[in-house]
Image (cartoon, grey):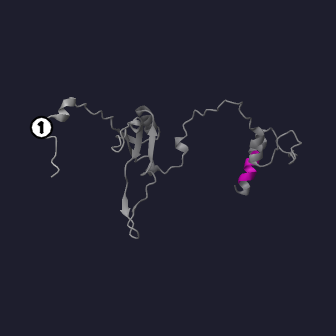
Amino acid sequence: FSSWQKVKVNRLVQRSHGDRGGKRERSNVSGSSKQPALGGTLAETNRARIHPLPQGQHQTIHEDVTTLTGVPEEHIKTRKVRIFVPARNNMQSGVNNTKKWKMEFDTRERWENPLMGWASTADPLSNMVLTFRTKEDAVSFAEKNGWSYDVEERKVPKPKSKSYGANFSWNKRTRVSTK
């Protein structure tokens, strides 16, 4: 803060406490004074007015704070995201990582760094992947942030009906010669 901003903040704090001028009482450092410091710094005044919540209670803010994020508009208005369920890893037999929905951003301009030959980008969101429990959570998050989105539905493989005896059939070419 500059000096004139500090004076302005102090005047606002004084008005909120009903002080219209005259002498101001300051609390000393030892904490023996029972009244909050009027005319002190804004942090001292805020510390005096804060009341902690009882154990186990949480304060909920119902306003939308996405407009206050400070993110440049080119990262908000022109972004397109892809919402999908990742495919099963071929190296593993489990399907545990395929139950969550993921959101990834479109790729922007990339170039090859002439010094090392590395791929470079000026996009901070290009390598970020967000994870959600449901498709609806991911869609609502994209809408809340103003991003256009494409949803790729979960691909369910068709089961192939095959008998166990087909593994040992002699009339089909299932074995490969090793010679």
Q: Where's residue 146, x and y in %?
A: 44, 41
Instruction: Identify which residue is drawn at 74% across, 38% down.
Output: 50
- Whether residue 129 is visible here, answered yes or no, is yes
Query: Which residue is situated farthest in the bottom direction here?
Result: 115
Q: Is residue 52 above or below residue 45?
A: above
Q: Does the magenta stretch include residue 78?
A: no
Instruction: Identify which residue is drawn at 20% across, 35% down.
Output: 167
Residue type indicated by callout 1: Lys
- Whether residue 162 is visible here, answered yes or no, is no
User: Relative to residue 36, is residue 158 drawn left or right?
Assistant: left
Give whichever of 50, 39 is nearer the camera: 50
Instruction: Identify which residue is drawn at 77% across, 46% down.
Output: 44
User: Relative to residue 12, is residue 149 drawn left or right?
Assistant: left
Query: Which residue is situated farthest in the front direction here?
Result: 179
Q: Where's residue 79, x and y in %?
A: 40, 47
Q: Where's residue 121, x and y in %?
A: 41, 59
Q: Main secondary structure of the magenta part?
A: helix
Give whichever of 111, 65 is nearer the camera: 111
User: Relative to residue 96, is residue 68 drawn left or right?
Assistant: right
State the quadrant of the N terminus.
bottom right
Give whichever of 106, 163 is nearer the camera: 163
Q: Where's residue 128, x and y in %?
A: 44, 48
Give whichever of 162, 30 is nearer the camera: 162
> Helix, strand, or loop for circle 1?
loop
User: Relative to residue 150, is residue 160 drawn left or right?
Assistant: left
Report how many numbered discs are placed on residues in the image. Answer: 1
Q: To which quarter of the image does residue 58 belong? A: top right
Residue holding disc 1: 172
Q: Is residue 8 magenta?
A: yes
Crowd tier of the residue under label 1, counting other residues whose Cα lies within 10 Å: few below 14, some 14–19, many 20 or above: few
Span colored in magenta: 5-11
